[in-house]
Image (spheres, rainbow, N blue to C red):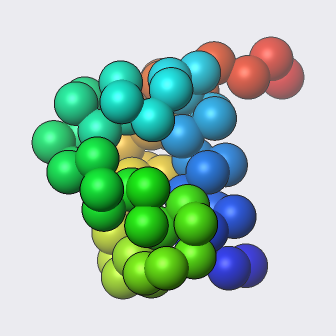
């Protein structure tokens, strides 16, 4: 799956907007913006770590 789709899905899992997501995880806003627009690619390990943290800390707000 492309980085831009995956990072947006991870952010949407939390129910946070981009600013909240960046502030919560300490990722610069322009970085996440570039990832979501496909202008830059997040390393695969960052995506895996974000997903693991979101699931472990029960930040996934989607209904099962």
Q: Residue at x 35, y 24 (%)?
A: 20
Camera-side residue: 35 or 13? 35
Outermost right residue: 64
For the point 16% across and 42% down, which residue is it? 26
Q: State which quarter of the image contains the C terminus.
A: top right
**Rendered image quadrant of residue 53:** top left
Please say if 51 is above or below 63: below
Q: How many labels does the image show?
A: 0
Against 6, residue 45 (above or below) is below
Residue, x 59% and y 21% (percent of image)?
Answer: 15
Q: Is residue 1 above or below residue 6?
A: below
In this view of the protein, can residue 59 be seen by the observer?
yes
**Which quadrant: the N terminus?**
bottom right
The picture places residue 50, in percent across and down from the top left corner, at: 39, 53
Q: Which residue is drawn at 50% across and 26% down?
A: 17
Pinpoint residue 10: horizontal percent, then vertical percent.
57, 47
Viewer-proximal residue among 64 and 13: 13
Q: In which quarter of the image is residue 21?
A: top left
- Say which of 28 and 57 sits in front: 28
Q: Residue furthest left?
A: 26
The one nearer the camera, 23 or 51, is 23
Image spot of residue 28 (x, y percent): 20, 51
Residue 56 appears in the rendering: no
């Amino acid at each position: 799956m492309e980085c831009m789709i995956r990072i947006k899905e991870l952010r949407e899992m939390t129910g946070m907007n981009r600013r909240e997501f960046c502030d919560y995880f300490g990722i610069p806003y322009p970085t996440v913006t570039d990832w979501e627009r496909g202008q830059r690619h997040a390393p695969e390990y960052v995506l895996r770590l974000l997903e693991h943290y979101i699931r472990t800390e029960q930040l996934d707000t989607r209904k099962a």
